[in-house]
Each structure stands twice: as structure tokens, then as C-alpha cells.
Image (spheres, grey):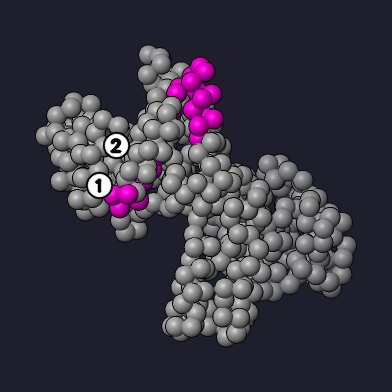
């Protein structure tokens, strides 16, 4: 089980509180190691002083992720796969969201291939303050022809810098692709009980990560993993099989859970590798593209929840992609820290001295809801996001994270003088903070008018028709 006690990590530190790591105490550094805000190499004494050599070695073992972390790709586009420590996110958090890899095939016409690659590479959606994107491209060898596969891989590389998954059970085909992009560290799919020797040679020669595939046979999968490890190949991803429906789907889910539990709770290091799920298999069950995309989305959501570390998908349509993007975002958000924006003054549109100022909290969902509602109604304004540690309006009003004094101080810290910068010195409070209006007027000496807006920011446009500018 993953070590979650800072005290046990503290025992392996110099315990001198030297501050060279950026923390005031070694105990604080230990807490940072658990949260992955700090790395072992951030402690200079551990690295530089020989007397700490044993502690350094022990600490590296302790903080290593329970599930091995495998890097796919190179440079800024590299994706970390796996590296998790817990079964469920409420136990601590998940760190590396599973990359979504969308497929192209070597039988596509060149124009359609290029168009799809560009669509995959450019897909993005702004969601609660962050851009959610696709991360990888899976190149599938449908033709079985090494030269066609190589040409396809080359064309993909020319039009995208995304990390690749090279998909074929034929080692000759995989080699043709690796000859083109081997230096870019693609993930090769896959080694099986029939081709493992040839694929192992490729993984060793090109120094690339490899998927081990043994559908619905965990013993066979473990045998492959042990064999590759004994050969010195440890950048492995496990494919236990992804059934698109029926009883086999239940077996698939159970196998993913068994692998995660064996790794994290039972400490079976010989299968402590990330897993890959193939929601794309839904397309083999029906000729109806709408139904296939629906079930692919359902499978993706299911395997995100069940701990798959990488996905291969097909449908790039928004109705299929967006639900899974949103679910993945939420599952891989630290439950201990609310999603928040930087506190301060933000502008929407092109505000002037006659424009209003809205007050809200820095909880990201609240802030971006307000911003979206005013922007969609073409309201030029300022928004003050008060630092409530990412807590929403109603909860922060009840819990004291937002107060009249804090609102006044937030304007001061943001350098925004209501009297100097507004033709109508005023602020608009969220409806749930209405009780602050009187005290705020007193704090501003009656020079700033305090208006109480609606509880729902979607009603701001209607509210402003009768109340702005203030009378």
C-alpha cells in the first residue's frame, strides 16, 4: 500500500530543516512528497552527502508510484501513463488522466487521413478554466502491408506532433512504422503469446514502450509481463481485453479491477503496470454509427471509472467526446482541492467607466458560469473573484470564507478603486450574499452603492434592464 504518513517519510530525510528544498521543515517536505508537489531530488543533502545514501535509496522506493509510470512520446507532447497510487480517488487523488487516442488507418485515402489527423490534433474544449484536449493518435494497420503502414505513419507524423500508438500484431508491420517514428517513442501494440519474441526485439532495439495483450487471460498476461521484465523491458502497458457488451464486458471490468487491486492492495510488482482499454471495439458490434459512438462513450466512461490508464477510441464527434472529457476531468481532479481561478479583477468584453462590477468567488465553476452568462449576453463588465479557497458563494457565505471586509480588501489587493474607475461607484453582489450589503456600504463610508444581483447569474441580463445604471 502507498505510504500516506508524512512521519514515515520524515524518518528517511536528513531532519535538519535546512530549507534548501524550499520548505521550512523536513516534515513539510515529506508532506510535499506524498502530494507529489516535491521530488526526492529536490532535497540537496540527500543527493550530495554520502551518509544519506541508504535513506535516499529507501526513499526512492517508498515514493515510487504503485502503478509504474510509462512515458509515451517525447518533449512537450510526452504523456505519462499510469503512475497511480490508490484504488479510489477519495483515498488521495489520481495524478495522470488516461490519454484518449483516436484512430486512423493505413487504408484511408490520403486527403481523408490528413483531414482526420488535423481534426484530432486540433480538437479542444474549454471546461471550467482549462482546455480539454485529445492527446494521442492510434495508427491501425488494417492493410497488413508494411509499406502502406509506413507511408501512413509518415503522413501522420508530417501533420501532427502527437504521441502515437502503432497498432498491429505483425512484427514486420510494427518495424516499418518504427523505422519512421521510432525516435519519437511511440507505444507499440501489441505483443501476444504468438509474437512476443519478435515484438520484444523491437521494443529493445527502438527503446519504446510496448503493450502486452492477453485478452481474458490474466495468468497469460502475467506470464508475458514477467518474461519481458526478465529481458530488461519494463516500459509495459497491459491489455486484459475490452469486450464491448454482454457477460464478457463484466469480465473485462472485473479484470481491470483485479489488476489494480493486485498492484495497489496486494503489492504484486510483477504486474504493476498501467492498463489499456479499447472502447473502439464498440464499432464492431453495429453498423449504426450513432449507436456505435454512443456505446463507445459508455465504455470509455466505464473504464475511466474502473482505472484504465489509456484509451483507444474512434468517434471524434462532440456528442461522443465531450461527456467522456467532462467525466475524466472530474475524476482526475484532486478531491482535496476545489478547482479555482486566481483571485482578482477580470474583464469581460471592453468595459468602460459606465460598466458594472460583479462580485463572486474564485471557485472555478462559479466564476466561469458568471463569466459565460455575462459574455453570452454581451455585457461589458469587470468581475471580482474573491479568494475563498475555491468554495462557492453559498457555502463561503455560510462558512465565513467570504465577508464584507474580505470583499473590500480584495478590491484593494487588485488595485481597483471603485470611486476612481467607475462613473457609478458600485458593486453587484451575488443574491446569496445579500446580507453583506449594509455592512459593505458602511465599510465604504456610503461612497459606494451596493446592489444585490440575482441568485442565478443566468438572470443577470433581465436584472440589469431595470437596475443598471443604478439610480
Image coordinates for residue 235, horizontal then vertical, percent: 35, 50
385 to the left or right of 454: left
Q: Mark number for residue 203?
A: 1
Q: Are marks 2 and 1 in contact (CB under 8 Å)?
A: yes
For label 2, the residue is 191
> Magenta residues?
230-256
Q: Quadrant of residue 461?
A: top right
Q: Quadrant of residue 103?
A: top left
Nearer-N-terminus badge (2/1)? 2
Q: Is residue 431 visible?
A: yes
The C terminus - image quarter: bottom right
The residue at 37%/14% (across/down) is 287
Query: Circle 2: is it few (<14), some (14-19), or many (20+) Cα within 10 Å?
Result: many
The residue at 87%/70% (across/down) is 442
Q: Nearer the viewer, residue 171 or 155?
A: 171
Q: Quadrant of residue 377?
A: top right
Assign a secondary structure to mark 2: strand
The residue at 37%/42% (across/down) is 225
Image coordinates for residue 410, horizontal then vertical, percent: 70, 69
Image coordinates for residue 308, horizontal then vertical, percent: 48, 39
The residue at 16%/46% (across/down) is 180
Amino acid at each position: 500500500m502507498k505510504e500516506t504518513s508524512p512521519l514515515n517519510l520524515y524518518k528517511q530525510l536528513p531532519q535538519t530543516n535546512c530549507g534548501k528544498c524550499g520548505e521550512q521543515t523536513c516534515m513539510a517536505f515529506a508532506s510535499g512528497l506524498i502530494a507529489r508537489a516535491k521530488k526526492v531530488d529536490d532535497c540537496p543533502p540527500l543527493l550530495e552527502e554520502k551518509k544519506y545514501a541508504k535513506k535516499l535509496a529507501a526513499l526512492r522506493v517508498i515514493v515510487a508510484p504503485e502503478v509504474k509510470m510509462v512515458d509515451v512520446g517525447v518533449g512537450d507532447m510526452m504523456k505519462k501513463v499510469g503512475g497511480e497510487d490508490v484504488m479510489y480517488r477519495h483515498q488521495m487523488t489520481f495524478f495522470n488522466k488516461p490519454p484518449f487516442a483516436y484512430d486512423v488507418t493505413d487504408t484511408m485515402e490520403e486527403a481523408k487521413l490528413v483531414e482526420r489527423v488535423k481534426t484530432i490534433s486540433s480538437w479542444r474544449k474549454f471546461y471550467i478554466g482549462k482546455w480539454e484536449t485529445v492527446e494521442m493518435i492510434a495508427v491501425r494497420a488494417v492493410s497488413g502491408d508494411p509499406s502502406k503502414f509506413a507511408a501512413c505513419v509518415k503522413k501522420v507524423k508530417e501533420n501532427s506532433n502527437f504521441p502515437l500508438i502503432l497498432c498491429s500484431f505483425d512484427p514486420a508491420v510494427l518495424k516499418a512504422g518504427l523505422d519512421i517514428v521510432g525516435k519519437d517513442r511511440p507505444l507499440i501494440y501489441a505483443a501476444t503469446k504468438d509474437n512476443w519474441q519478435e515484438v520484444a526485439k523491437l521494443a529493445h532495439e527502438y527503446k519504446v514502450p510496448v503493450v502486452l495483450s492477453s485478452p481474458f487471460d490474466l495468468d497469460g498476461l502475467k506470464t508475458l509481463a514477467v518474461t519481458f521484465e526478465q529481458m530488461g523491458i519494463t516500459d509495459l502497458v497491459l491489455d486484459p481485453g475490452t469486450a464491448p457488451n454482454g457477460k464478457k464486458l463484466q469480465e473485462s471490468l472485473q479484470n481491470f479491477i483485479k489488476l489494480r487491486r493486485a498492484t495497489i492492495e496486494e503489492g504484486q510488482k510483477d504486474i504493476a503496470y498501467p492498463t489499456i482499454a479499447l472502447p473502439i471495439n464498440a464499432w464492431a458490434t453495429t453498423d449504426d454509427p450513432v449507436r456505435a459512438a454512443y456505446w463507445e462513450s459508455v465504455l470509455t466512461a466505464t473504464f475511466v471509472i474502473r482505472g484504465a490508464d489509456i484509451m483507444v477510441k474512434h468517434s471524434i464527434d462532440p456528442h461522443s467526446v465531450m461527456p467522456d472529457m467532462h467525466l475524466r476531468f472530474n475524476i482526475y481532479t484532486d478531491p482535496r482541492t476545489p478547482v479555482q481561478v486566481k483571485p482578482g479583477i477580470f474583464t469581460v468584453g471592453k468595459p468602460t467607466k459606465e460598466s458594472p462590477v460583479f462580485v463572486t468567488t474564485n471557485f472555478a465553476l462559479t466564476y466561469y458560469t458568471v463569466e459565460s452568462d455575462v459574455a453570452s449576453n454581451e455585457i461589458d463588465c469587470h468581475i471580482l473573484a474573491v479568494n475563498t479557497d475555491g468554495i462557492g458563494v453559498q457555502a463561503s457565505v455560510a462558512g465565513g470564507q467570504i465577508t464584507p471586509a474580505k470583499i473590500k480588501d480584495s478590491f484593494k489587493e487588485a488595485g481597483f478603486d471603485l470611486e476612481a474607475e467607475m462613473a457609478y461607484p458600485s458593486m453587484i453582489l451575488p443574491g446569496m450574499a445579500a446580507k453583506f450589503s449594509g455592512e459593505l456600504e458602511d465599510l465604504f463610508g456610503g461612497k459606494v452603492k451596493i446592489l444585490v444581483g440575482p441568485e442565478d447569474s443566468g438572470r443577470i441580463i433581465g436584472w440589469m434592464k431595470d437596475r443598471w445604471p443604478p439610480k
